Image (spheres, helix red, strand yellow):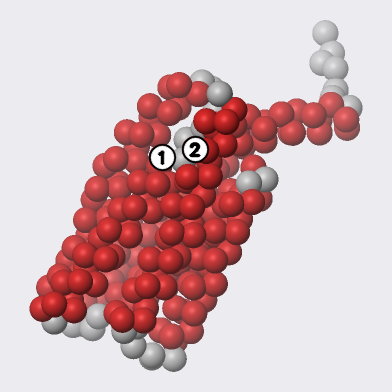
Amino acid sequence: MEERKLTEKESLEVITSMIARTKQRYVGDGRIMLLWGYLVGIVSILVWIMLAATGQSIWNLLWFAIPVIGGIATPIMARKHQIRSGIMTFSDKVTSRLWTIAGGSEFVTILVCICIQYFTGSSCWSAMLAYTLVAMPMAEIAQGLLIKEKSLTLGGAIGLSIGIVTVCCVAGRIPLGANWYMPLFILAFVAMMIVPGHILNNKASREK
């Protein structure tokens, strides 16, 4: 028996339905964004305070708490949410892969920075900050456009703007001084993760 082909209108309805389901899924769970936003914010403030108080660069090791804590907590939270939300749509998979690519490339960048410092003695961790504020905002902007969520698109745009400033400073060999750069870095994650996370959770509570 020959399968009936979808009309253009029906195809658009299917795509719209998938996007709506994906948006509903993510609107219902801003907790992962809040986890990363507050985690980065707290660690950044702690590093900033300790560097200012002691002047010892050893406190930069605290940055490693972010991928360790976030890397353990995120899959657990995502798995629980997936069980509650049911089958993943194509839009869900695209969104998931966007963040997988962004997160995976962050991990590779960390390894490259470690290897360069170990084998050459040169520190390139400022490049890590620049890459973070380019890769993560781009993934968030793409997700915001996919599910038509303005808070994600705008938050990602703010983060990317700060990322572009960071890239220019690194390229121009302008030192990223803690007193002026740390507030910008924290602002980027407040705009990208904390504000959208609360907005998504607030929308979810209104829809219940």
Q: Residue at left 38%, top 29%?
A: 79
Q: Nearer the viewer, residue 10 or 111?
A: 10
Assign the C terminus to one quadrant of the image.
Answer: top right
Residue 132 locus on image (x, y percent): 41, 65
Q: Nearer the viewer, residue 122 or 193?
A: 193
Q: Nearer the viewer, residue 104 or 58?
A: 58
Q: Residue at left 47%, top 46%?
A: 197
Q: In the visual, does 156 lie left or right of 1?
A: left
Residue bearing mark 2: 201
Instruction: Give the foreground label among 1 and 2.
Output: 2
Q: Are marks 1 and 2 in contact (CB under 8 Å)?
A: yes
Residue bearing mark 1: 31
Residue 119 seen in render: no
Looking at marks 1 and 2 on the same chain, the residue that comes earlier in the sequence is marked by 1
Q: Residue at left 17%, top 66%?
A: 61
Residue 196 locus on image (x, y percent): 51, 49
Residue type at the position of mark 1? Arg
Q: In the image, is residue 199 above or below residue 187?
A: above
Could you classify mark 2 by the number of other residues whose Cα lies within 10 Å: few (under 14), some (14-19), or many (20 or more)?
some
Q: In the visual, does 87 lie left or right of 6?
A: left
Residue 20 locus on image (x, y percent): 67, 32
